[in-house]
Image (cartoon, rainbow, N blue to C red):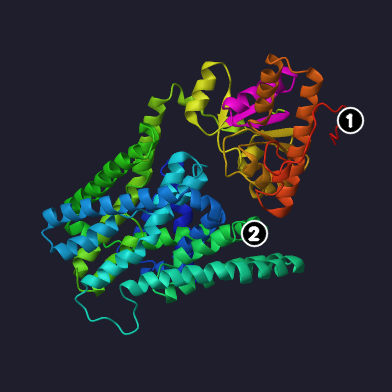
Amino acid sequence: MLNGVFLLGAALVFVLLFRRLGLGAVLGYLVGGMLIGPQALGLVGDPDLILSFAEIGIILLLFLVGLELSPSRLWRMRRDIFVLGSAQVVLCGLALFGLILWIMGFTWQAALVIGLPLGLSSTAQVLPLLQSQGRLKTEFGSKSFSILLFQDLSIVPLLTIVAALSRAPAEAGTPQGLQLVLNAGIGIAALVLAGKFVLNPVLALVGRVSERELFVVAGLFAVCASAALMEWLGLSPALGAFVAGVMLAESPYRHELEADVDPFRSILLGLFFLAVGMMLDLSVVAANPLLIIGLAAMLVAVKAAVIFGLARLFGLANAPAFIMALLLSQGGEFGFVLFSEAERALLIDPAASSLFGAVVTLSMATTPFLMLIARRLAKRRTTNESKLDDPESSPVTSVIVVGHGRFGQTASQIVQAAGREVTLIDIEPDQIDLSGEFGRKVFYGDGTRVDLLRRAGAAEASAILFCMDDRDFDADALVPIRETFPKTKLFVRAFDRRQSLALQPSGVTIRREVLESSICLARDALEAMDCDAAKIDRVIEEYRRRDLERMRVQRESGDLHAGSNLSFGGEDSDDFDPRAEGSDTG
């Protein structure tokens, strides 16, 4: 009990202090852990036990991230995950391997099992940062997440490399080499089937019982069971939790699970960073301060340079590429795991494990400072960073428009011309600056988040227009918004027919972004060809009727090819005579 008092007290004091200094919560947890740990004041002992318990926080974090990613979205991200992610892990790992081999004079095996883990970044540090700032859906946020996800997947081949190079006799029953890869396939397949045939029916049963605490139990059971399965197979427990989250991403109970699990994630992640701080061997730091600082600086610099180059190669502009490079430049928590495995495999000695554990910890402590640098550089890049105001400072208006690109600009101007006050929100600083040049005040933020909409005055607004170019925005994303602001009417821009179908169950007004302009262009063409005006009206009216009917058939069948007979010009198209005055237009 006393240990708990010291842990929570240190978290409270140091996180408040470092938040007030603008340095972030993670650095506060690390410093607090150093001070109360066995290497300093000795108020709390056995950091390994606390770390093993607190690692559940990382597992819960990956589960919550999985809940936000449907299988279809993951498929669209496959290039970033497997190409960009693998390039980052391989290039950073090999660059660090070469430098450690040269600087430290280790054997190539030791340098390899240290350099490759150092190429990984801290999921526990980066993902909460992206989520809290609403950056996870930005281009650099999405690519950062893709890299982090591949890094979690890469634990399997990295453990395989350590096992293949091991000088220690293999433990009986421990999976090795290709067996780990086979286990990964079996584990993922088992979780996919369990999500479909076990978890969803169980959640439906819990929903009928209507006991809130049962949702907490069911959510934690899903996380722990999936993580335990992967751990039993010799794999990363966090990977199992992530797969379970993805399997439940399209469940109607997704938001309930997210709300119930998130508080546990926050507390346990804090304990994780406290434990990391407690594990820092201060005697090693005191004996080699310049070496550790130099190695940490080398780690950050090399990773930042490689990631910046990859980000530019994959289409990011200089500023977001630089922010992404700084964001992922630290060492990660899986480094501690892999260093321990390498030590057990007799590839490195305990002193080297402690030394590079200190390097990883110090590199993690640099992230808040590096993000301050990134924000200051972003200020210089933008014409006026002060324009990136939070919607909380906006006046109360009757309409909120989310997304001020080519679509949102037209919609907002028409609404304003009708005498309605409008609050404009966008997540792209460049777009905000451009709008400012034309005298338009646009507030910064992710307008799909309930907390931000609440600060913008959505509870008092008559309508919210979602005009952003986000093809992943679907009915599930609208559920918490509708539930939080039941009196506010919602209007959504859809990219195409697929997104329109994905939004259909939401009960909001949807407009495909090119439908009306396409109809207008066709009308202009027919009028230029001296087509009869009444005939044009009948054709367009019939097209609209058929389009709505086709959408209904597609939605009910779940098949995009359904209702093809309702399209004009197809082989199976129903007959329509535009000359007939009495044509059935519905």
Residue at the image position 30 percent from the left and 72 percent from the top: 177
Q: Which of the two labelled residues, at mark 2 and mark 1, occupies the earlier sequence position?
A: 2
Q: Is residue 8 in sight in this rendering?
A: no
366 relative to 196 in the view: left or right: left
Residue at the image position 78 percent from the left and 18 percent from the top: 532
Tag shown at residue 209: none
Residue at the image position 35 percent from the left and 75 percent from the top: 179
Which residue lies under the disc numbered 1? 582
Q: Nearer the viewer, residue 288 or 396?
A: 396
Which residue lies under the disc numbered 2? 251
What amino acid is at disc 2? Ser
Q: In this view, does 134 lie above or below 287?
A: above
Q: Which of 328 and 98 is in front in this view?
A: 98
Q: Position of residue 417 (x, y in %)?
A: 72, 17
What amino acid is at disc 1? Gly
On whether residue 185 falls in the magenta region, the answer is no
Residue 221 location, quadrant: bottom right
Q: Position of residue 224 (x, y in %)?
A: 52, 70
Distance CA(mark 2)–CA(mark 1): 46 Å
Q: In this view, does 484 lie above or below 4?
A: above
Residue at the image position 71 percent from the left and 54 percent from the top: 557
Give the total of numbered labels. Answer: 2
Q: Where is residue 388 in the image (x, y as percent from the top left)?
A: 51, 29
Q: Which of 480 and 18 is in front in this view?
A: 480
467 relative to 6 in the view: left or right: right
Q: Is mark 1 on a helix, strand or loop?
A: loop
Residue 47 location, quadrant: bottom left
Q: Which of 476 and 558 is in front in this view?
A: 558
Range covered by the magenta-colored residues: 398-425
